[in-house]
Image (cartoon, rainbow, N blue to C red):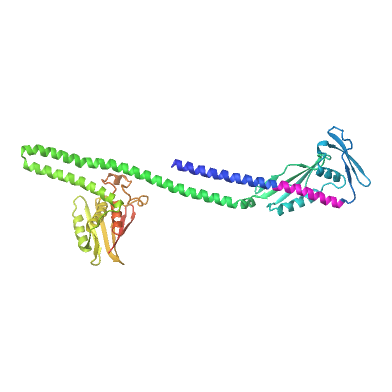
């Protein structure tokens, strides 16, 4: 059982790890889309400003090719204005930064326009965005601006890009914040979640069934072990008794004591008959499991059968037994007399065994359609609901101390069910502790 639980935990853990990996991959893909869209938005915002400024702007980033210094001087020349600035020579060939540097002196970047462009691009690329925020860092003015405040909510997944420096002097930086509802993310991952849940559910059911099978096998092995211990003890008694009787018989034969010889023979025969009965019970169950029992069917009168049956059991001496018969009409049943008799004997002997000083048994027999219905009800100890599904199992015996004290192998009801199946019928049971137990036999005519 513990190994099954460990296997289930391991599978669930692996599924969680797989889902986490899928989520991480989705997160990275969304983050890449956001980054690419931010870059494109910056370009489109620049083109928008370029259209708005009009006129001609020239740009120069130095005149000395043999100047090896890192910091150089550049200039931006408009129709009536010249702007001088310092720049890092490592950025000399970055055209995008050069254009942004030239334009920032005439028409600075508009973060609201950039936010609007960015939001629309995200929607166009199927990113389920809820809110976007553009942040601009201006080192020259030593200030940070945002289009609006970031919404704080546990229902939103936050994405944040790196800072992109736009100009040659790296003084204007742009960063984007994107918020996506978790339920939109879950919808995107719905198929993976469904497949994972389906797999976990399927594995759980399989492992649960497997654990049930293992438990039943363990239970059956325990019952069989108990049965073997009990059977060994039971077999030992008639064997020991018959051996003892035979030893005495041998001694008495020499003494020519006829009366004692007959008594010893009777005792030996009785002990061996008991042993034979035990062996026959086991053989009947074994044959029944393999469906090899040969049936010899005869036509019997149920009124006659149950009258003799009633007379026989009401004559027992160790307990008061009352059998009440209800047979409304003469019914002839085609069945194997020996096995049918054994079935009724097993039910009745159980009623007598598992009851107090007296027991009342009601047997109701009637014809319905093409079947005979036999209801066998007693007012004995009853069967707990927790055990009622197991009483037809091989070697099963009740858990109560009272029932454990009674002798038996736990094969009687297993034999009854096996034989009813062989005869083409069925048997069912209902019971209430300390009130009644009722078996219903349905046997084809």
Q: Is residue 264 left or right of residue 41?
A: left
Q: Residue 232 location, x and y as percent?
A: 25, 40
Q: Is residue 337 visible?
A: yes
Where is the C terminus found, in terms of image quarters?
A: bottom left
Tell me: residue 211, above or below residue 255: below
Residue 294 quadrant = bottom left
Residue at the outermost left position: 256
Q: Is residue 256 left or right of residue 292?
A: left
Q: Magenta stretch: give its range.
A: 33-52
Residue at the outermost right position: 80
Q: Residue 322 location, x and y as percent?
A: 23, 57
Query: Which residue is at a point 20% across and 50% down the rendered structure image?
Result: 318
Q: Residue 401 location, x and y as percent?
A: 31, 44
Query: Which residue is at a point 70% across and 53% down the rendered structure image?
Result: 125
Q: Residue 270 location, x and y as percent?
A: 16, 46
The number of numbered discs placed on residues in the rendered structure image is 0
Query: Which residue is at a point 75% across and 50% down the rendered structure image?
Result: 118
Q: Is residue 39 magenta?
A: yes
Q: Is residue 36 left or right of residue 52?
A: left
Q: Is residue 150 visible?
A: no
Query: Which residue is at a point 11% across and 43% down the rendered structure image?
Result: 263
Task: Pick the residue in front: 57 or 383.
Answer: 57
Task: Pick the residue in front: 277 or 330.
Answer: 277
Q: Main secondary structure of the magenta part?
A: helix
Q: Is residue 195 magenta?
A: no
Residue at the outermost front position: 66
Task: Pick the residue in front: 107 or 270.
Answer: 107
Where is the N terminus found, in terms of image quarters?
A: top left
Tell me: residue 123, above or below residue 272: below
């Amino acid at each position: 059982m513990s190994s099954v639980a460990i296997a289930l935990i391991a599978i669930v853990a692996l599924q969680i790890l797989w889902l986490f990996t899928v989520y991480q991959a989705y997160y990275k893909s969304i983050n890449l889309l956001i980054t690419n869209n931010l870059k494109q938005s910056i370009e489109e915002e620049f083109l928008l400003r370029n259209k708005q400024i009009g006129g001609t702007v020239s740009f120069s980033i130095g005149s000395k090719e043999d100047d090896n210094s890192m910091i150089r001087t550049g200039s931006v020349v408009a129709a009536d204005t010249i702007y001088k600035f310092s720049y890092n020579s490592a950025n000399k060939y970055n055209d995008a930064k050069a254009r942004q540097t030239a334009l920032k002196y005439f028409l600075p970047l508009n973060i609201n326009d950039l936010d609007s462009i960015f939001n629309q691009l995200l929607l166009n690329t199927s990113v389920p965005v809820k809110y976007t925020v553009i942040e601009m860092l201006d080192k020259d003015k030593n200030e940070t601006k945002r289009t609006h405040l970031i919404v704080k909510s546990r229902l939103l997944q936050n994405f944040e890009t790196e800072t992109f420096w736009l100009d040659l002097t790296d003084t204007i930086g742009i960063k984007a914040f994107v918020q996506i509802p978790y339920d939109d993310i879950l919808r995107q991952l719905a198929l993976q979640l469904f497949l994972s849940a389906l797999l976990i559910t399927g594995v759980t059911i399989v492992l649960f069934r497997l654990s049930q099978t293992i438990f039943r096998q363990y239970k059956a092995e325990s019952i069989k072990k108990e049965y073997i211990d009990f059977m060994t003890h039971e077999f030992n008694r008639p064997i020991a008794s018959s051996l003892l009787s035979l030893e005495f018989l041998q001694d008495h034969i020499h003494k020519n004591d006829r009366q004692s010889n007959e008594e010893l023979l009777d005792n030996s025969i009785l002990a061996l008959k008991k042993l034979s009965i035990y062996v026959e019970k086991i053989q009947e169950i074994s044959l029944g499991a393999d469906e090899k029992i040969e049936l010899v069917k005869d036509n019997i009168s149920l009124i006659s059968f149950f009258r003799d049956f009633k007379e026989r059991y009401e004559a027992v001496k160790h307990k008061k037994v009352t059998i009440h018969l209800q047979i409304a009409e003469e019914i002839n049943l085609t069945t194997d007399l020996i096995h049918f008799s054994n079935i009724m004997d097993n039910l009745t002997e159980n009623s007598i065994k598992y009851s107090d000083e007296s027991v009342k048994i009601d047997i109701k027999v009637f014809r319905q359609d093409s079947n005979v219905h036999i209801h066998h009800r007693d007012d004995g100890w009853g069967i707990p609901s927790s055990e009622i599904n197991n009483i037809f199992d091989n070697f099963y015996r009740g858990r109560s101390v009272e029932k454990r004290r009674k002798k038996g192998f736990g094969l009687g009801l297993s034999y009854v069910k096996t034989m009813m199946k062989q005869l083409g019928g069925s048997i069912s049971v209902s019971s209430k502790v300390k009130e009644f137990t009722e078996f219903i036999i349905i046997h084809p005519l």
